[in-house]
Amino acid sequence: MNSTLVKKHGFSYAKYGYLFSIPFFIAFLVFNLYPTIYTIVLGFTDSKGLGNITFHILKDDPWKNFRAVLNAPTFKTAVGNTFTLWIMNFIPQITLALILTAWFTSRRNQILGQGFFKVVFYMPNIITAASVAILFNALFGYPKGPVNDLLVNTGLRDSAFYFMNSPKATRWIVAFIQFWMWYGYTMIILISGVLGINPEIFEAAEIDGATDTQIFFQITLPNLRTILTYTLITSLIGGLSMYDIPKMLNNGNPNNATLTANMFIYNQAFQGSYMYARAAAASMIMFVIIAFFSAIVFFLMRDRKA
Amino acid sequence: MTLNRRDGNPVVKAFIYFVCIVLAILSLFPFVVMVVNSTRSTFEIQQHAVSLIPSSHLMDNFKVFEGKPFNPWRGFLNSLIVAVGATALTVYFSTLTAYALVAYTWKGRDAFFTFILCVMMIPAQVTAIGFYQFMYRIHMTNNLLALILPAIYAPGSVFFMRQFMLASLPLELLDSARIDGSKEFNTFNKIALPIMKPAMATQGIFCFVSTWNNLFIPSILLTKDELKTMPIMVSLLKGDIYKTEYGAIYLGLTLTVLPLFIVYFTLSKYIIAGVALGGVKG
């Protein structure tokens, strides 16, 4: 009798599991899988022109669009810029986040006002990136702008500097904005990771006379491996999809110095001759690049002991 | 060794506070300049671009927007419609999907969950071209529903809800509801949803903010001025019309950022806790 009850229990309710998953699954099919397949197919067609929805599969030379994208000098520039900008922001970001994490979780130096600092450091992250970029464009204005005013008034420079005309300066500004928007987020994630480590390990280390630096490098960091992997991968995916900041700050200028892969895709599809097919091919190439580098990160950061 | 170990080194501590205060100023300063300059005239800004003293030209700056494409109220309303709609759908259907994963045992459940973990990682922009063409074919460009309905599918949110539900929804409660004759869908709405409120609030805030801030997809779908959302509106401030209207640009930015400031500083406690929880899932 007991077994029939269990069977009845498992059998009669299982259908609700399927039933309640249906809305999610349908939305996935319609709004994600179908557009993904559509994008892949478009990559092998001659689709172009605003308002034109007819296209033909390229039977003679299916990889034409992919070759065109890979051979385009602007695509190489865009991919190179995307990686450069990500690295320029990620290294300072993870370094500062780790330092702040070490300080805020130190058991010897109890820092007051941590709640306030966390709220303020994280704040730029929730502000619309488009607004932030336009604000920074105004702040770095030339010849008159807040930053130039400060530089000249404090005597750091004799005359105003035309930031948005300098490839190097514009890149650093994009990297700085990304860094400034994300270090607080990374710090909060890392702190929550440290709080999840068994406190007995820290106590034992303290009793053994370990210094703060030793504790950080020998206990905290190794225990944060999973969370660091997570941070690295989400930041990589986000960084390689970068669009809003460089687009709104200076539209990829000067000299395409801040043109990113996603801006390249947008420009192919929605400017000039509306080359949807080429944009779709570029999207797929970017997807492969992102998947490849995520896999490398997973591989390098895997737990070798396991 | 008279120093108390708990107190640490006072020089180190002073240095830590110094760095933290510098970073706090760095976070706040651009926004202070923005708000103050939105009350100053273009002439005043050209004389001294940095000032901490507000001036009296707020209304003059506001008049610049009249009859021009940048319409903060329109943008605000459109963003609100999209963000509220998307948030409601994400929160409700993610909880429902998580409930299907937690409350029932069914064939393919684990595979379905693994699948959710995989698709979580795919950035939305990858499929944007196909999505645009699809929406164009079914005449859904320039329709806010094209930005709202896809929110039913939110794998990251389902993942979060499932983790929360596993820890806080006692399955015995569902069994006793069944004995009382409650229908399954009713049990979900009356028993599971109230228990999930904290997780729904967290996911709701994040979904709202990220939808509100989204630029890429709305900017390819919406071409009509009266449908433009806040991030597209704000990009209009870079146009030639406002080139010499410094005060108006700062005011426009302030208006786009203000709603987020209000949401953030009222809910900051929950937001920070939510970010920290998000990290644990890694």
Image (cartoon, coloured by chain):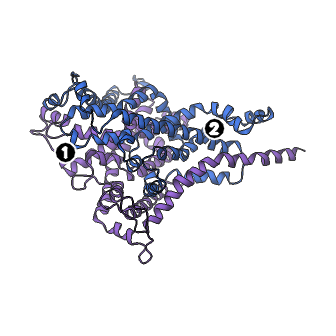
Chain colours: A purple, B blue
The residue located at (60%, 53%) in the rendering is B114
The residue located at (59%, 38%) in the rendering is B92
Q: Relative to the observer, which residue lies in front, B277 or A228?
A: B277
Chain letter of the residue carrying label 2: B
Query: x%, y% of residue A239?
Result: 38, 50
Q: Relative to the observer, which residue lies in front, B267 or B251?
A: B251
Q: How many labels sit on residues?
A: 2
Query: x%, y% of residue A12?
Result: 79, 46
Q: Relative to the observer, which residue lies in front, B247 or A216?
A: B247
Q: Quadrant of the N terminus of chain B?
A: top left
Chain letter of the residue carrying label 1: A
Residue, disc 2 = B165
Query: x%, y% of residue B17?
Result: 33, 28
The residue located at (44%, 70%) in the rendering is A56
Q: Are marks 1 and 2 in contact (CB under 8 Å)?
A: no
- Crowdedness near tag 2: few (<14), some (14–19) or many (≥20) residues, C-alpha within 10 Å: many
Q: Amino acid at mark 2?
A: Met
Q: Amino acid at mark 1?
A: Phe
Query: Which residue is farthest right?
Result: A1
Residue, disc 1 = A163
Element under disc 2: helix
Can marks 1 and 2 be said to lie on one chain? no
Q: Could you tell me if residue B82 is visible in this image?
A: yes
Element under disc 1: helix
Q: Is residue A130 above or below residue B27?
A: below
Query: x%, y% of residue B231?
Result: 36, 41
- Crowdedness near tag 1: few (<14), some (14–19) or many (≥20) residues, C-alpha within 10 Å: many
The residue located at (29%, 39%) in the rendering is B69
Q: Image quarter for residue B254?
A: top left
* Label 1 to label 2: alpha-carbon separation: 50 Å
